[in-house]
Image (cartoon, rainbow, N blue to C red):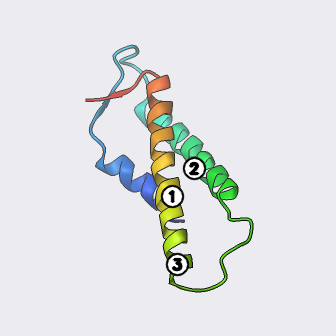
Amino acid sequence: MLLSVCISLSACASPHWVNPRNPAADLQADTAACERDAERVGRLNQLVGQPAGGCFYGRGCAADAENQQMRIAAEATVAQKRCMAARGWRQA
């Protein structure tokens, strides 16, 4: 859930997108497709990033989980920007 909120907020806070290669490109469709891709990347990273031994209690567990969620959200944002760039978009 945190991941989808971060992706949604990053889309709102980001600068204007332009597509110089294809000015008629559909920004909404490409953004939606790239958000889905970024969410998939986030979910995969979340699965891969699970600690083998697990964390059972303590303040360190909560901090580790929060740091992992922030890292995953950042990686998903990067994936979304790469996807948009691959479709010809750049931030103006």
Check contact, mark 2 vs mark 1: CB within 8 A: yes
On the image, the x and y values in percent for residue 52 come to: 74, 65
Residue ID at (55%, 70%): 65
Q: Classify 40 as above or below 6.
A: above
Alpha carbon distance from label 2 to label 3: 26 Å
- Judged from the image, the secondary structure of the residue bearing numbered disc 1 is helix
Relative placement, left or right, of 18 versus 41 is left
Question: So how many labels did they put on this image?
Answer: 3
Residue ID at (53%, 54%): 72
Q: Classify 85 as above or below 7.
A: above
Q: Earlier in the sequence, mark 3 or mark 1?
A: 1
Residue position marked by numbered label 1 in the rendering = 4
Alpha carbon distance from label 2 to label 1: 7 Å
Q: Earlier in the sequence, mark 2 or mark 3?
A: 2
Say which of marks 2 and 3 sits in front: 3
Q: Earlier in the sequence, mark 2 or mark 1?
A: 1
Q: Which mark is residue 60?
A: 3
- Judged from the image, the secondary structure of the residue bearing numbered disc 2 is helix
Say which of marks 3 and 1 sits in front: 3
- Judged from the image, the secondary structure of the residue bearing numbered disc 3 is helix
Q: Which mark is residue 39?
A: 2
